[in-house]
Amino acid sequence: MLHNFFSIFVQSIYLSHMSVNTSSKLNETVSWVGKWTFVLAAAGSAVGLGNIWGFPYKAGTEGGGAFVLIYLLCILAVGLPIMMAEIMIGRRARKSPVNAMKAAAIDSGQTSKWQAVGWGGLVSGILILSFYSVIAGICLNYILIAANPTPDISSLEQFNIVTSSPSRLMFWHSVFIALNIMIISAGVISGIERMVRLLMPMLFILMMVMVVNAMINGDFARGLSFLFAPDFSEVDATTFLRAMGQAFFSLSLGMGSIMCYGSYMPQEENIFKTSLTVAGLDTLIAILAGLAIFPIIFAYGLEPGAGPGLVFVSLLSAFVDMPLGNIVGPAFFALLSIAALSSAISLLEPSVAYFEEEKIVSRFSAALTLGLFAWVIGIGSVLSFNDWSDISFIGDLNFLDSIDYLANQFLMPIGGMMVAIFAGWFLKPDLALDEFSGIHLVIFNIWRFFIKYISPVLVAAVFIYQLVS
Ligand code: TRP
């Protein structure tokens, strides 16, 4: 595996020099080469720990089917319109989120201060990457653990062994950040495009293997009814808020990841159709993850509402007891790691793109510096599992939870709401219509209605609720 990564890396550097040379002769901007690359890259960004680790445990604690239904509504009413707005703003400027927001504002006769939305995205991208990488590092470590489970140790003890060791967490956190730096510094085409073309099919195949495994080894009927038969008795205001937050995080919105990937989208691609495809794939993978996990949880008599430890503790114990568990287990954690890697690169790319575009430093130096920056902040998250577990930062939250709170509950909803308010109220409608080229006028008007009235109000409701609760 590592050998493969390395050879891809070496080839990538070689190719990135070729593509930079040719593209700089033709024009300044970069475009994805393959027709499906935008969809793969955006789906790669969207499908991550949020889908395979977050969605199942949240659906598990929020009562299953009812949560899934509300989640789908949030994807359609809030996620899809904002995703279309982000891609549209990115593609028309063909620049990093900071400069894309600035260009859209200036071209609409508004203040260039709207670029602050882009800046907020860069900062939160690095913040999210810092703790995302620590959790992804645990997933990498679990590939080995699931292949060779230590006998006579419960899966909870195993999880405690992993998280109580700062040096172990640091090692895997460093490996994960290094992979990110390698891919991003190899360039948009030779790094990101190449990687998502390799990783996304692998992810899909592994997911299918896991669902088939759940059909064979799990209680599939019970898993199905848990996910699809809605029980509204568990639903309250917080279910809506959790579902909305999850939809936002899962679609990678509000932080420039999608705007940045949109800036590489070829002009002839249809923004509405691609957004629909990306949102659909993201939802499909989240539901497949539920179908891979819950039948196993039920068959082995485990608790669906176990919370964040659902995959690391509950699922691991099932793999240990399962026939061929030492193959299926590592495959599951490899799936999780791959999904995390293709998401993490989209957290680093917007700021690297900005540094490169402004010619502050080369792509390689930007990737290295910003990656190291996220790595250093991540040390706080490593320690919050052990040495710093009693130290509170924001309120009574430890370091990891504080950064998570700051980024997810604060910067991300504000970013998404600002994108919606900007696109709905300040951006010239003609500019949007122009960029959505080929869109049916009815769909365009529905989009306008949602981005103006529905999406910002719903996001604001979540945001305000979180502040007061
Ligand atoms: N969507 C990813 C997940 O589900 C995480 C992610 C990547 C993200 N880029 C993002 C979340 C930008 C918010 C904003 O795990």
Image: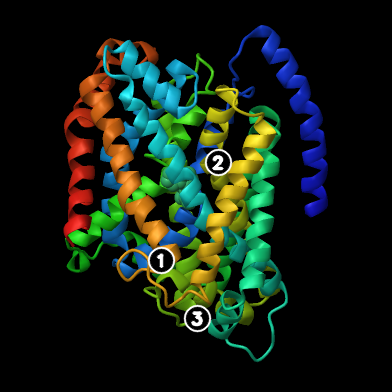
Mark-to-mark CA distance, 2 and 1? 26 Å
Residue 395 to residue 299: above or below: above
User: Which of the numbered marks, if any, corresponds to residue 348?
Assistant: 2
In this image, 322 relative to 214: left or right?
A: right
Q: Are marks 2 and 1 in contact (CB under 8 Å)?
A: no
Mark 1: amino acid: Tyr
Q: Are marks 1 and 3 in contact (CB under 8 Å)?
A: no
Relative to 124, is 220 above or below?
below
What number is the disc on residue 300? 3
- Mark nearest the camera among 1 and 3 is 1
Query: Residue at the location (41% across, 38% down)?
Result: 121
Amino acid at circle 2: Leu
C-alpha gap between disc 1 and disc 3: 16 Å
Q: In the rendered image, is residue 71 in sight?
A: no
Q: Where is residue 110 shown, x and y percent of the image?
A: 26, 16
Mark sitting earlier along the chain (2/1):
1
Q: Nearer the viewer, mark 2 or mark 3?
A: 2
Residue position marked by numbered label 1 in the rendering: 57
| Label 1 Cα crowd, 10 Å radius (few <14 / some 14-19 / many 20+) | many
Q: Earlier in the sequence, mark 1 or mark 3?
A: 1
What quarter of the picture does the N terminus occupy?
A: bottom right
Mark 3: give few (<14), some (14-19) or many (20+) Cα within 10 Å.
some
Q: Work out whether residue 292 or residue 79 is closer to the camera in this orientation and state it.
A: 79
Query: Which image quadrant for residue 318?
Result: bottom right
The residue at the far top in this view is 26
For the point 45% across and 54% down, the residue is 50
Tag 1, which secondary structure?
helix
Q: Nearer the viewer, residue 217 or 456?
A: 456
User: From the image, which quarter does the C terminus lie in?
Assistant: bottom left
Tell me residue 168's x, y (percent).
66, 71
Q: Is residue 417 above or below residue 57?
A: above
* Side of 91 where 217 appears, left or right: right
